[in-house]
């Protein structure tokens, strides 16, 4: 994680910031933090989860959408990039021709842990998403082969950690049937 030379940006300036590099940044207390490009494993896991969540939304006929790499405003001058988030169509409609940075809490956020994002995903985003009142947050950790499902209870997250063949238990998608192992198997290319 690298902080750029820009000394301070407001949230509004961040929404239109473009340094011409194509790099992605999070805004943390007014500072831009460069996000490293994800690994292929990371992309494969995120893709599988996006496909599963899209299919479940469609199966249930819910007015929801699943997006990859959108922003979520988590403070006055703070915005995080999510690996996946599920929002209502109304939330998406509000941003139709604007930067895809949600200012209201998504229904579900999924982060796939990378070696450089461990502290960010487990600590900072956890507290910021709880403060924003995101009802459900998954931390998908291929480094530990675990998936933590965090459910908001009275302003704090209650965590359940699954590994191996344990099923992901989701409040947002109670009928979802996916094993932790299936998620991590998706992160490997077939020979």
Image (cartoon, helix red, strand yellow):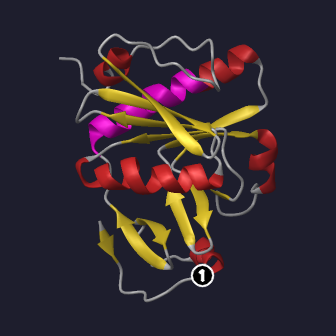
Looking at the image, residue 65 sits to the left or right of residue 165; the answer is: right
For the view shown, which residue lies furthest in the bottom direction? 7
Q: Quadrant of residue 5?
A: bottom left
Q: Residues within 10 Å of mark 1 (few under 14, many from 20)?
A: some
The residue lying at 53 percent from left, 57 percent from top is 128
Nearer the observer, 42 or 190: 42
Q: Quadrant of the C terminus?
A: top left
Residue under label 1 = 10
Residue 51 shown left or right of residue 3 in the figure: right
Residue sitting at 60 percent across and 38 percent down?
Answer: 152
The answer to whether any part of residue 118 appears in the image is yes
Q: Residue at x 68, y 23 (%)?
A: 57
Please state the horizontal and vertical placement of residue 70, each as a whole percent of the image: 56, 52
Q: Is 171 rendered above or below residue 68? A: above
The vertical placement of 128 against 107, above or below, is: below
Q: Is residue 180 magenta-colored? A: no
99 relative to 46, above or below = below
- Which residue shows up at 80% across the image and 49% down it? 93
Does the rendering let one see residue 70?
no
Frontmost residue, 107 versus 88: 107
Locate the N terminus by quadrant. Answer: bottom left
Measured as percent of width and height from the top left, residue 176 is found at 57, 14
Magenta range? 39-53
Element on which disc 1 rests? loop
> Which residue reaches farthest left?
191
> What is the chief secondary structure element of the magenta stretch?
helix
Q: Is residue 24 left or right of residue 88?
A: left
**Count of numbered circles on the image:** 1
Q: What percent of the width, then of the height, locates residue 7? A: 43, 89
State yes or no: residue 43 in magenta. yes
């Amino acid at each position: 994680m690298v902080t750029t030379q820009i000394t301070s940006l407001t949230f509004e300036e961040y929404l239109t910031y473009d340094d011409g590099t194509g790099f992605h940044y999070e805004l943390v207390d007014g500072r831009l933090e460069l996000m490293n490009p994800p690994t292929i494993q990371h992309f494969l896991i995120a893709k599988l989860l996006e496909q599963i969540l899209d299919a479940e939304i469609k199966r249930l006929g819910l007015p929801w959408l699943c997006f990859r790499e959108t922003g979520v405003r988590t403070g006055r001058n703070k915005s995080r990039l999510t690996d996946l988030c599920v929002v209502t169509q109304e939330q998406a409609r509000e941003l139709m021709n604007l930067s895809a940075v949600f200012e209201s809490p998504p229904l579900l956020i999924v982060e796939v842990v990378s070696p450089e994002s461990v502290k960010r995903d487990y600590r900072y985003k956890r507290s910021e998403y709880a403060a924003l009142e995101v009802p459900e947050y998954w931390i998908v950790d291929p480094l530990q082969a675990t998936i933590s499902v965090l459910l908001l209870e009275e302003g704090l997250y209650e965590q359940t950690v699954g590994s191996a063949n344990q099923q992901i238990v989701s409040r947002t998608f109670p009928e979802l049937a996916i094993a932790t192992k299936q998620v991590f198997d998706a992160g490997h290319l077939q020979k």
